[in-house]
Amino acid sequence: MPSSKRPRSQSPTEEEPSGSEVEIPQPNKFLRTEPTSDTEGEVIHCTLPPTCNPPNKPTALFGVEQLEAHYSKYHAFVCNAEGCHAVFDREHYLNLVCLAA
């Protein structure tokens, strides 16, 4: 019984480049722990209320770790009651003081 498959053709060699094949350059891959050149030395300015917005000066931060530490210390647990704007280091204290009032 004859095979119904077509005969296998030879793939193009380096000497015979195919006109339909285009080489696409691959971008460089970076590890998440490696600093990239566009973020090195970049200063981040925090302007969030109540401590970093006018009339106060914006806070200059160098890197994501400093930004996260700053946010958790000065912006995560802020009382939004009118005229209060107290800053707490834990949600528990915010709930005790501001929600009780």
Image (cartoon, helix red, strand yellow):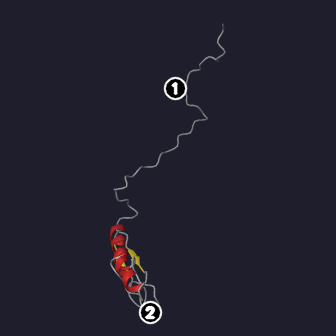
Q: How many marks?
A: 2
Residue ID at (40%, 63%): 38
Q: Do the residues labelled 1 and 2 touch (CB within 8 Å)?
A: no
State how far apart marks 1 and 2 are (Cα).
Answer: 77 Å
User: How far across and down, in percent of the image, does residue 71 sit?
Assistant: 37, 75
Residue ID at (40%, 82%): 78
Q: In which quarter of the image is residue 46?
A: bottom left
Q: Which mark is residue 52?
A: none
User: How far across and down, in percent of the image, does residue 101 sit?
Assistant: 42, 89
Residue in the foreground of this view, choosing between 45 and 71:
71
Q: In which quarter of the image is residue 83?
A: bottom left
Q: Is residue 89 left or right of residue 47?
A: left
How packed mark 2 is, by other alpha carbons closer than 10 Å (few <14, some 14-19, many 20 or more), is few
Q: Which of marks 1 and 2 is in front?
A: 2
| Residue lying furthest front | 100
User: How far across and down, in percent of the image, does residue 2 sit?
Assistant: 66, 9
Residue ID at (34%, 76%): 90
User: Please, what is the three-letter code of the amino acid marked with disc 1?
Assistant: Thr
Q: Is mark 2 on a helix, strand or loop?
A: loop
| Residue lying furthest top | 1
How packed mark 1 is, by other alpha carbons closer than 10 Å (few <14, some 14-19, many 20 or more), is few
- Residue beneath disc 1: 13
Q: Is mark 1 on a helix, strand or loop?
A: loop
- Residue beneath disc 2: 83
User: How far across and down, in percent of the image, does residue 76 sit?
Assistant: 39, 76
